[in-house]
Image (cartoon, rainbow, N blue to C red):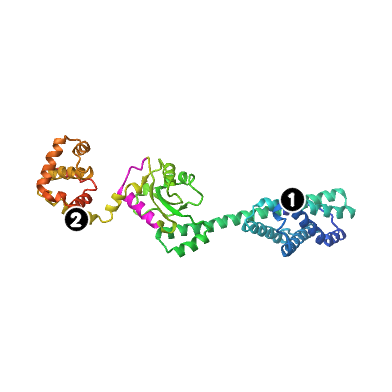
Amino acid sequence: MSDEFGTNHRTARLELDGQVAALLRDRLPLVAERTVSAIIAEVPDYSGALTGTMREKIEKAVRIALGTFLQLIEGTQSADPSTPLAPALEAAYALGSGEARSGRSMDALLAAYRVGARVAWREVSTTTVRSGLAAETVAEFAELMFAYIDELSAASVAGHADELASADRVRQRYLERLTQQLLAGEPEEILRRSAERADWPLPQTLTVVLLPRRNLRAVLALLGAHTLESGEDLPGMDPAEERAVLLVPDMHGGRRRQLARLLHGHRAVLGPARPWHRVAASYQRATRALALGLGTPDAAPVDTEEHLAELLLSLDPEGLADLRAQALRPLAALPPATAHRLAETLRSWLLHQGRREDVAADLFVHPQTVRYRMGKLRDLYGDRLHDPATVLALTLALALPPTPPAAV
C-alpha cells in the first residue's frame, strides 16, 4: 500500500485548532449516518445489503475512518502518520477482501467511496466554513481529505485483488486434486465431495483428450471453461513429446464430431465419452491407443471409437499370440514367405466373405492367384474352414494384418 497521504500530511501545515476539531468529532455520527444513507440511495449493489447490524457496522467504520483522518491532521504534523494510518488502511484492505469473498466486483465499492467522499466533504466543509477557517486552509483540508480517501480506496483494491488471487489459487488446487481423483477412478462419493469443494459443476459425461503439451494452450482456448487439465505428464513418454491430459465435459453423441473438428491438427487422441465419475475408463483406453500408435494423429485426431478391434485385441498380447499360433498351426511347416502369403490371403478371404474378386483387389493379385492360394489353404485346413469355431478363431487371430517375415 502506498503512503501518498502520509507524505502529503508530513509536508502540510494545516492550522486546525482544537475547537474546530472538537466540532468535527461531534458531527462524526451524523456524517457517518448521512454517508451510508447516500451510498444506499446511489449505489444499487448496496441498496438492500446495508441494513440492520450491517448498517451499524458500516457507520462505525465510516466514523473510525473519519476519526483517524482528524487524528492525523489535528496538530500532529511532527508525529509519524503511519501509526494511526495503518489501522485504517488495514480496515480498508479487509473491506476489499470481504467484497471479493461476497462475489462482488470493486465497481460498487469504488462507487461507494466516491459517494462517501462527496457527502462526507459536504458535511465537513460546512462545519469548517462556519467555524471561520480561512479559504486556503479549507482548500488544504479538502486536498488532504481526498488524498486520504484515495489511500483507503487503493487499500481496498489491493485487498480485493489479493483475495481473488488467493481464492483462485485455492480453487485451482482443488480442481487439480479432483482431476487426479477422476483419473485414478476414486469412488463417486469422494468425487462428488471434491467437485463441490472445487465449485465444479457436474457434467453428464467426460471425455479424455491426450495431446502434446505444446498444443495445450491453443486447445484450451477452444474448449469450455469447465474443462479439467491434469498438471502431470503421462508416464513413460519421451520428454520431447510431453503429453497433456484434458477432461472435456459433455462431448457425447453428436458433439463428439464437433470435438474432433476442434482438435484437428493438434495431434490429439480421444478416449470414449463416459459418465463423469467413470472417466478413468476413457483415460485408460486413450493411453492404450497412444501406446499402440494407432491412427495418424498429424491431422485428424485419433478417435478410439474407430479402433475398438485393435484395442480389444491388445488387452492380452500373449493370449493373441497363442491364439494366432494355434489357428495358423497348419501353416507352420511352410517356408515363412509362403506362410505369410497364405495367411494374408486367408485374412482377406474371411474379411470379404469369400468374394474372390474383392480379395484379389485387396491383395493386388489376379483372381486366379486367389483361387490357387485358397486351394492350398483348403488342402491344409480341410473341412475346418467351414467350422464356425475355426472361422471365429481364424478371424480373431488374423484381425490384425500378419507380420511379414524378417528379411534374411
Q: Does the magenta portion include 127? A: no
Residue segment shown in magenta = 280-298
Give the class, few, some or many, for how many residues have Cα within 10 Å of label 2's Cα (few <14, many ≥20). few
Q: Residue furthest top?
A: 366
User: Which residue is denoted by mark 1 in the rendering?
Assistant: 114
Q: Nearer the viewer, residue 357 or 344?
A: 357
Where residue 295 sits, quadrant-wise, is top left
- Distance between mark 1 and mark 2 Cα atoms: 82 Å
Residue 193 position in % (x across, y down): 49, 63
Residue 231 position in % (x across, y down): 44, 54
Q: Is 174 situated left or right of 305 in this image? A: right
Considering the image in quadrants, where does the N terminus appear?
bottom right
**Prevailing secondary structure of the magenta residues:** helix
User: Which residue is denoted by mark 2 in the rendering?
Assistant: 322
Q: Nearer the viewer, residue 368 or 136?
A: 368
Q: Is residue 277 visible?
A: yes
Residue 308 position in % (x across, y down): 31, 50
SS assignment at label 2 = helix
The three-letter amino acid code for the residue at tag 2 is Asp
Q: Is 79 situated left or right of 330 in this image? A: right
Residue 19 position in % (x across, y down): 87, 60
The three-letter amino acid code for the residue at tag 1 is Arg
